[in-house]
Image: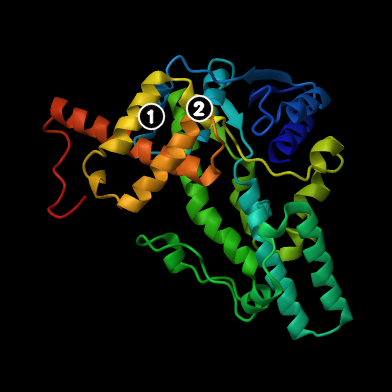
Amino acid sequence: LDSSTIVGMATRLFERPLSTFSCVYPGLSSVDESAYIYEATERFQSNAHFITPTFDSFLNAVQQSIREQDGPTGGPSVLSQRAVMSLAKGKVTVLLDGQGGDEVMGGYHSYFPFTLSQLMRNVHQRPGIHTFRQFQQARSAILERAGSGYVPKLRKTWKMSRRPVQYQRIRYGKSVLDYMPAGNLDDLNTRMLEDLMLTLCNLLHYEDRNSMAFSLESRLPFLDYRLVTFMFSLPPQFKIRGARTKHLLYETAKPVIPSSILNRKDKMGFSTPGQTWYRHDPAMLESVNTLLTVPPEPLHKVDTAHLDKLRLAWQACQQAQPIRVQDEMAIWRYVTACLWLEQMAAYKIAQPNVLPALPQGCS
């Protein structure tokens, strides 16, 4: 919805077809959105370019990405985004991207519990058939669309509604949220603000490094400060209504994009076939096996129970058994942290006077 809306509206504004760049994975239905992409590019008659990342050496690709990002990354989708940037290099100098649409417009299924707590709060603030029916209808619609994992039990929803939601983050130190109060009785905007200020900032870091690696400027229309300010001034029903996410964007995009995209019920992020990539590179398999057996300094202090969980997930991955997305991400983060530490150690040996020593007691 985000990217298609940008393509559609930009095409109207420029009054000519535009170039589009997409990462596709034909035959892998769990991560491939090519059917929707083809429909959008046909609607807007765009000059469409596609790439399906394949790696002669997945290990080399990961190491190169770590060098460009200057550190570990959160998941393998950074490589899909990097592939799009490599595809665009030499064809355009500026890219428009849909990043930020979910955080600003209310697009994640994880926001459903907070809209339900808001509706439940309405029930005990203004008891009556109308407010209770609103809550029940929204709850039923969300159950049908997203499943019970996104619908808390009534007791928990009631408990959530008794007080305004606070920021959920684990405190690893100061952040901008330390200077911003949570929204008063506005659970959804509070949760969205947290994602905007913390999670999205990591994604923007990746995008900025990926685009710079290929001499491109990446621009994000959904993060124009005027749009962000406007959206956070609106009450929750403009973001999520019933089980429809990004309600205001949905209404705005109705005349522009194909109905099949507009009315999609599934939610797919910038997904990648990470487990397949791991298995197809012997060098990567050997590297991960080594890193999980003998962690480098200072990761040798990682809790043994956590390492055991990673090893079990890794064994399943090697045997082509599906593993949870959370486990795939955990393996990726551990491995990229290890590879980054190895790069830093090698650089320090080659350039001993460049990197300062860590303060005593710091790891």
Instruction: Tell me if I can see residue 363 in this picture.
Output: yes
65 left or right of 267 in image: left
The answer to whether the residues at label 2 and label 1 have Cβ atoms under 8 Å apart is yes
- Which of the marked residues, 2 or 1, is nearer the chain's N terminus? 1
Say what amino acid the circle numbered 1 marks. Answer: Glu
Residue depicted at 20% across the width and 29% down the height: 347
- Amino acid type at circle 2 is Arg
Disc 1 packing (10 Å; few <14; some 14–19; many ≥20): some
| Horizontal and vertical percent position of residue 78 | 49, 33
Residue 82 marker: 2
Q: Secondary structure at mark 2?
A: helix
Q: Horizontal and vertical percent for residue 336? A: 37, 36
Indicate left or right for 42 with 170 as reference: right
Measured as percent of width and height from the top left, residue 358 is found at 16, 47
Q: How is the image coloured?
A: rainbow
In the displayed structure, 326 sits above or below 182; it is above
For residue 53, above or below residue 311: above
Q: Quadrant of residue 130?
A: bottom right
**Residue found 71% across the figure and 74% down from its top:** 154
Q: Could you tell me which residue is drawn at 74 percent across and 44 percent down? A: 266
Q: If the image is split into quadrants, where does the N terminus sit?
A: top right
Q: Mark 1 — residue?
A: 68
Vertical position of residue 205 compared to residue 278: above or below: below
